[in-house]
Amino acid sequence: MLTPQPVAQTPSKSLINLRVTRRDRDLIDRAADALGKNRTEFMLEATRRAAEDALLDRSLFRLDPERFNAFQAALDAPAKPSEALRKLMATKAPWEG
């Protein structure tokens, strides 16, 4: 008789179990495969992105009218190009060869 062995986990990782329909699992697997990822990689990436979006959508900061006008003026002002930006803009994209 085999004795179950404890699952070794690194302290920095946790296990999350999900129950999904076969249809959902198959959809996730097809999408992961299309991106060259496994199910775990795909689900973790998608979930992380959704979590970040959910938190960013709820970020709120308040400014008094004077500071808001200054903030808005800074956003509307043209960017001042730095040497790093000039260099970046002069560099060809990897797909341009």
Image (spheres, helix red, strand yellow):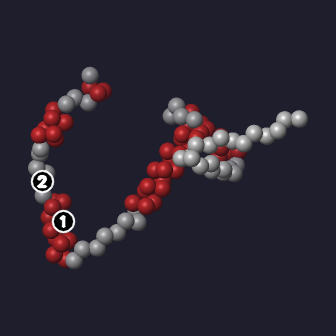
Instruction: Point out residue 32 in the picture as x, y percentages from the top left corner.
Output: 56, 37
Rendering quarter of residue 92: top left
Q: Say which amino acid is labelled 1.
A: Gln
The residue that mark 1 highlights is: 72
Report the side of 73 relative to 36 (left or right): left
Which residue occupies the foreground of this view, 9 or 44?
A: 9
Rendering quarter of residue 64: bottom left
Other-residue count near label 2 (Cα within 10 Å), few / some / many at <14 / 14–19 / ≥20:
few
Instruction: Point out residue 72 in the picture as x, y percentages from the top left corner.
Output: 18, 65
Report the side of 43 relative to 81 (left or right): right
Q: Residue furthest right?
A: 1
Q: Quadrant of the C terminus?
A: top left
Q: Quadrant of the N terminus?
A: top right
Q: Is residue 31 visible?
A: no
Task: Give the number of the disc on residue 78.
Answer: 2
Q: Residue furthest bottom?
A: 64
Q: Which residue is located at x 43 percent, y 56 percent? A: 53
Instruction: Point out residue 26 in the picture as x, y percentages from the top left corner.
Output: 65, 40
Q: Which residue is located at x 41 percent, y 66 percent? A: 58
Q: Return the disc, 2 or 1, that comes first in the chain's sequence.
A: 1
Which residue occupies the foreground of this view, 30 or 16?
A: 16
Where 79 falls versus 93 (above or below)?
below
Q: Which residue is located at x 48 percent, y 53 percent? A: 50
Q: Which residue is located at x 48 percent, y 56 percent? A: 51
Task: Give the number of the disc on residue 55.
Answer: none
